[in-house]
Amino acid sequence: MVWLVLMVLPVLVVGLVARRAVSFAWLWAGLAWLAALGWAADWAPALTVLAMAAFAAAMYVLRNPALRRRWLTAPVFALFRRALPTMSQTEKDALEAGTVWWEGELFAGRPDWAKLAALRWPQLSAEERAFVDNDTEELCRMVRDWDCTRRQDMPAEVWAFIRARGFLGMIIPKEYGGKGFSALAHSEVITRLATRSSTPAVTVMVPNSLGPAELLLHYGTPEQKQRYLPGLASGREIPAFALTSPWAGSDAASIPDAGVVCRGQWNGAEVLGMRVSFDKRYITLAPVCTVFGLAFRLYDPERLLGGDEDVGITCALVPRDHPGVDIGRRHAPLDAVWMNGPVRGKDVFMPLEFIIGGPAMAGQGWRMLMECLAAGRSISLPGSNAGMQQLTARAVGAYARVRQQFRTPIGRFEGVEEALTRIGANTYLSDAARVLTAGALDLGEKPAVVSAIVKYHVTERARQTVNDGMDVIGGKGICLGPQNFLGRAYQQIPVGITVEGANILTRSLILFGQGAIRCHPWVLAEMDAARGGDLEAFDRALWGHAAYTASNAARALVMGLTGSHFVRVGADVAPETRRYYQQLTRFSAAFAFLADLSMGILGGALKRKEKLSARLGDILSLMYLASATLKRYEAEGRQAADAPLMHWAIWDCMFRIQLAFEGVIANFPNKLAAALLRRVVVFPLGHPYVVPSDQLGHQVAALLIEPSPTRDRLTAAVHLPQDVDEPLGALEAALAATLAAEPVEARLRQAEREGRFSPGVLASGDVDEVWRRARDAGVIGAEEYALVERRNRLRDKVIRVDDFPLDFGLAEALGAASAGRNPGRNPTPAP
Ligand SMILES: Cc1cc2nc3c(=O)[nH]c(=O)nc-3n(C[C@H](O)[C@H](O)[C@H](O)COP(=O)(O)OP(=O)(O)OC[C@H]3O[C@@H](n4cnc5c(N)ncnc54)[C@H](O)[C@@H]3O)c2cc1C
């Protein structure tokens, strides 16, 4: 009987903790349990009463704020304050920037799926739809990537079109002449342009991302707004933003570029200003900009501004033709055509009115940048990289059906199928995350952590997708030229990986590092209370935190033991996805507990344990990506035909979540905690997910290699030229022709197998001779031959790669004089 009562205890505790029972429930449950134990163990009544009184006294201390603070909270408070790492203002600005959104629910262990279900899936307005379908399509038609590559610029008429149609002012409100577009519209435009060429995509992306327009809108003085915004909206002004220096890339807050407050001449008068020296590199659009934002650290040794000597990072807006500015040279970022280059200046005098927001905003530059970072980071790279994925899915899928080896479309080989499967599912998932996140911005959120998640994961998935695409199309992707539809995207992938927070750093430091402090319901409150010396606030946060941690551990355990079958999803979701919501709830609770334990055991050292932090960030990110995928599936009407894409993406996320959990647990510094974590809390009955099945993968791959509404939905943003002289136009036509010709091809093979037809010796070198002989032999009819003949013609267009003169035509372009010096043409130099 004693054993029975003892065994009830953990069940009782886990139940109370999991349900976050109020203290009275604890009190009565505890008293009842002690009474039962006393009875079962045959204790003397006095002993039982003593035990119950001691328990009641402990509960009283816990319930009484004054006693609890003095006896329990105060010692922890002192320890916490000693252990709290110091934080610079720039770190604080970065951590506190933006808002917490859906990722907060996932972080805290109790995602409210009804909230996700209630979110409206973002839609374009009629005006935005027209801009995407007309203006953006027209811009796509005007740009030929290979022509731009050869001339290393877009033609003048394309630049004029971009400016005149307002592409550079999508985020500028209409009152200044801009488009005032939603985040979704902005994202759709970038996504579509990226399916055509990175040149217009990046050119359009940068002025609409973090830079002069965004900063002016939030912090500009009325005069600055009137002076610049109409020009930026109309494209008269072209902006750039210069932060990165040769010595400060990822660690941008340590820029050595400096300004000193001083007096100087401006417009014929002596004014208070700044003498600024700067050396910036990698600045997109700098070579062609008319005005650029400049970040530098401002010093005021003579206290002319009346504040500190080190004023702090400051952002100024500098006209390109300002005296002393050295601008106009170019970098060649993996042969990108969009403009990028350095900006330099030595002791350049600028009036204080150049500071964005005026002198009052001197020193506020870092906070301004951090506050505005989320919007652009949520759109630019997720948009362009989702576009590249859609292009890959559309074009490579078609190619894999058209291209045959071993008398079989290559897309039917299991090895190629594997790559196609990843392409399809990653594209579906990435676009889901792109759209969901743009929708968050349109709801007024500035989700700092989510913006890092989508930036990191969509660019990483795009790297995988484009790499897979290159593998599938083989040499066709490698030989550059007008017929190559993927090689240029492949070249551009590292740019997305590196900019707007290089990916290794984003994964290792930001995703969990910022997430833990921003999304955790109690940590920021504890830190603020500790820094402010507020014991009362700390007491509230500490005990709230303790209840939260215990509850997550208990819930994870219960859900793990029951396979999360009894988790209430609380939203009307497709039956085929219900288990995913349940398992995500379970993973979310386990993650919340693991995050707390990691922070508790490692404390400030977690910042240096980047590998652990990265894996914790992976779990949070993958839960976000899975949520976005599920939301997309619901929003698009639970399309049964699309279900394989959704299922594969979710199984892949779940499997990777498990791996990330294992990665953290296996490397946990405290081995006892690791064992308890694995066997008790996170995986009490083992891993619920294996890799997505081959059969499911086969279904996904099959969706890519033939036309269908699913394929159209998956690649809805892709610009599809009608002209069969364009590679994508040829691919689309060739795919249709291939499908039409396949039954004819099957008949020919059948005739061969049955011995009714033998093509004989085919010595002409013409791969299509067999078809003529089959027609002449009456194996296929004239109409069937026409189908095959059309297929063959289009197939040849598709598989063709470009070739060039020995010197790529350079000699002709540069004139006869340079021809003599070209080593390719004239391998033996003249003496
Ligand atoms: C094509 C292009 C366009 C750009 N456009 C602009 C622009 O318009 N304006 C502008 O101001 N800047 C721009 N940049 C700069 C860009 O933001 C930086 O390149 C980026 O911040 C990384 O800096 P870095 O290249 O110096 O790499 P580094 O800072 O030298 O980093 C190298 C590697 O170390 C990793 N790393 C660094 N610190 C850590 C850490 N603590 N933990 C883990 N890993 C770490 C990084 O992730 C990266 O993988 C552009 C860059 C490129 C290449």
Image (cartoon, grey):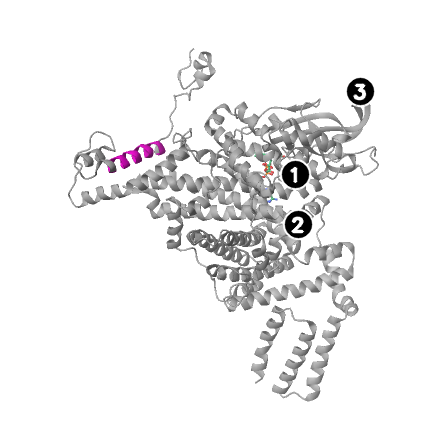
Query: SS for tag 2?
Result: loop
Q: Residues within 10 Å of mark 1 (few under 14, many from 20)?
A: some
Question: In the current view of this chain or complex, which residue is farthest to the front?
Answer: 126
Task: Establish if 11 lies above or below 246.
Answer: below
Quadrant location, the C terminus: top left
Callout 1: CB less than 8 Å from ligand 1: yes
Q: Which mark is residue 268?
A: 3
Give, as a three-letter code, the residue at label 1.
Ala
Tag 3: Cα neighbours inside 10 Å, few (<14), some, or many (≥20)?
A: few
Above or below, 502 relative to 34? above
Name the residue beneath numbered marker 1: 252
**Of pointers 1 and 2, the one earlier in the residue sequence:** 2
- In depth, the one of 654 and 750 nearer the eye is 750
* Residue 20: % across, % down: 64, 68
When asked about the image quadrant of residue 226, the answer is top right
Q: Which residue is mark 2?
A: 99
Residue 596 placed where, x, y %?
Answer: 63, 59
Residue 795 at what x, y percent from top left? Answer: 33, 35
Cα distance, mark 1 to mark 2? 22 Å
| Res. 86 in view | yes
Question: As shown in the figure, which amino acid type bears the numbered disc 2?
Answer: Thr
Contact (Cβ within 8 Å) of mark 1 with mark 2: no
Q: Which of 147/38 is in front?
A: 147
Is tag 3's residue or tag 1's residue first in the polypeptide sequence?
1
Which of the two discs, 2 and 3, labels the residue nearer the N terminus? 2
Residue 736 lies left or right of residue 61; in this view the side is left
So how many labels did they put on this image?
3
Q: Of the residues shown, which amino acid type is indicated by label 3?
A: Gly
Q: Are marks 2 and 3 in contact (CB under 8 Å)?
A: no
Mark 2 Cα shell of 10 Å, populated few (<14), some (14-19), many (≥20): some
557 vs 80, left or right, is left
